[in-house]
Amino acid sequence: MILTDREIKIAIHRELIGLNPEPAGDAFSSTSVDLTLDPLMRMFRKEVAHGINIDPGSIEFNFHEIANLLTERMIFETQFNLPPRKLLLGPVDS
């Protein structure tokens, strides 16, 4: 679904979309919102650990431990172009 800038603003106002803090007026274009992300991100590693069991329902599940295992901490000081077939997770405390 593609929303117009007007529809995006209405959805934010109705709390159907949550953005905190709410973007400035100049962040909206015809069908998008420009969001500035936190400079701390985590990029998923090329080599994913095989054979690990991730069970979020387990009492021993530790999100930060899993995030550290599967991702690499990165700090972006300038713009970053996300390469194809890459996934970022952020912001996550290390």
Image (cartoon, grey):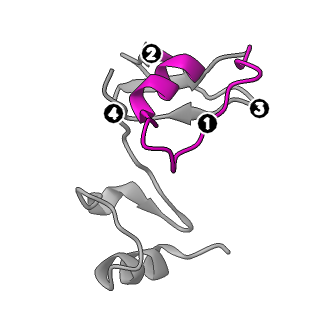
User: Residue under circle 3?
Assistant: 85
Q: Which residue is mark 1?
A: 54
Q: Quadrant of the C terminus?
A: top left
Residue 63 located within the stretch drawn in magenta: yes
Quarter of the view holding residue 49? top right
Circles 2 and 1: CB distance less than 8 Å?
A: no
Q: Earlier in the sequence, mark 2 or mark 4?
A: 4
- What residue is rendered at 50% in x and 44% in y? 58
Label 2 SS: strand
Q: Quadrant of residue 75?
A: top left
So how many labels did they put on this image?
4
Q: Is residue 15 above or below residue 93?
A: below
Q: Is residue 39 above or below residue 63?
A: above
Q: Measured from the top left, where is residue 84 in percent x and y?
A: 76, 30
Pick whichever of labels 2 and 3 is earlier in the sequence. Answer: 2
Residues under labels 2 and 3: Cα distance? 17 Å
Q: Which residues are magenta?
A: 47-73
Q: Residues within 10 Å of mark 2 (few under 14, many from 20)?
A: few
Q: Are marks 2 and 3 in contact (CB under 8 Å)?
A: no
Query: Does dot 1 land on a helix, a strand or a loop?
Result: loop
Report the amino acid beneath label 1.
Ile
The span from disc 2 to disc 4 (Cα, nearest Å) is: 11 Å
Say whether residue 56 is magenta: yes
Amino acid at dot 3: Arg
Q: Which mark is residue 74?
A: 2
Residue in the picture at 40% in, 28% down? 64
Q: Residue at x 51, y 27 (%)?
A: 66
